[in-house]
Image (spheres, grey):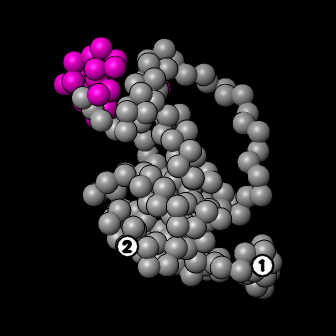
Amino acid sequence: MNDLIKTADVSSELAGFEDRSLLLADDDRPFLTRLTRAMESRGFQVTAVDSVAEGLATIRRTAPAFAVVDMRLGDGNGLDIISELKALRPDSRGIILTGYGNIATAVTAVKLGAFDYLAKPADADEIYNALMAIQHDKAELPENPMSADRVRWEHIQRIYELCGRNVSETARRLNMHRRTLQRILAKRAPR
């Protein structure tokens, strides 16, 4: 009985969206399989892919109304999928998922057309709520502000994105050796 009520609630939320097509792009196969099932149970017609090339080919055939895309895929950057989707279908809603969350990539994702940006691990409810959100809530004041190391790392990531993810150009602009920059970019964000 509870499942029937939940399904009715999902159907009423999706009623405002005639096209329920959803592209899921993630190279973590178990996660992709679970998320596909979860989103299908919420009323979406899901197409699941595990690479940038497949994602681009899919949206060029038929641009979906929704997309949930991992930032880093085996063959490239998920932002390329979001950018192409927005160019082909401006009314689409794309969400970027990433395990490497930082302010620079969040800003870039939004500029390229992402509707929202979620850090992994994100569950199906969080993703669904982000896709269905009418507007973004005002950001809350963080309990733990960024450390100086994190601020430096964010600045480097921002310049890297502004340079079109070109390591040589970024290193030149930051007056930094290219190999040093590559080591910094390969590491996880400091806390």
Q: Residue 33 has which mark?
A: none
The residue at 39%/67% (across/down) is 56
* Most foreground residue, 99 or 85: 85
* Most foreground residue, 158 or 1: 158
Residue 91: image x %, image y %?
Answer: 65, 65
Q: Which residue is mark 1?
A: 15
The residue at 34%/17% (across/down) is 174
Q: Residues within 10 Å of mark 1 (few under 14, many from 20)?
A: few
The residue at 22%/18% (across/down) is 177
Q: Which residue is mark 2?
A: 57
Q: Is residue 173 magenta?
A: yes
Q: Secondary structure at mark 2?
A: helix
Type of secondary structure dominating the magenta stretch: helix
Q: Is residue 87 found left or right of 142 in the rendered image? A: left
Identify the amino acid type marked 2: Ala
Residue 114: image x %, image y %?
Answer: 57, 53
Quadrant for residue 20, please give it.
Answer: bottom right
Residue 143: image x %, image y %?
Answer: 67, 26
In primary-sequence order, the first of circles 1 and 2 is 1
The residue at 72%/75% (across/down) is 17
Tell me the magenta residue range. Answer: 169-191
In the image, residue 165 sits, relative to residue 4, either above or below, namely above
Label 1 or label 2, whichever lies nearer to me, is 2
Residue 6 seen in this snapshot: no
Q: Secondary structure at mark 1?
A: loop
Q: Is residue 21 found left or right of 167 in the rendered image? A: right
Residue 107: image x %, image y %?
Answer: 55, 39
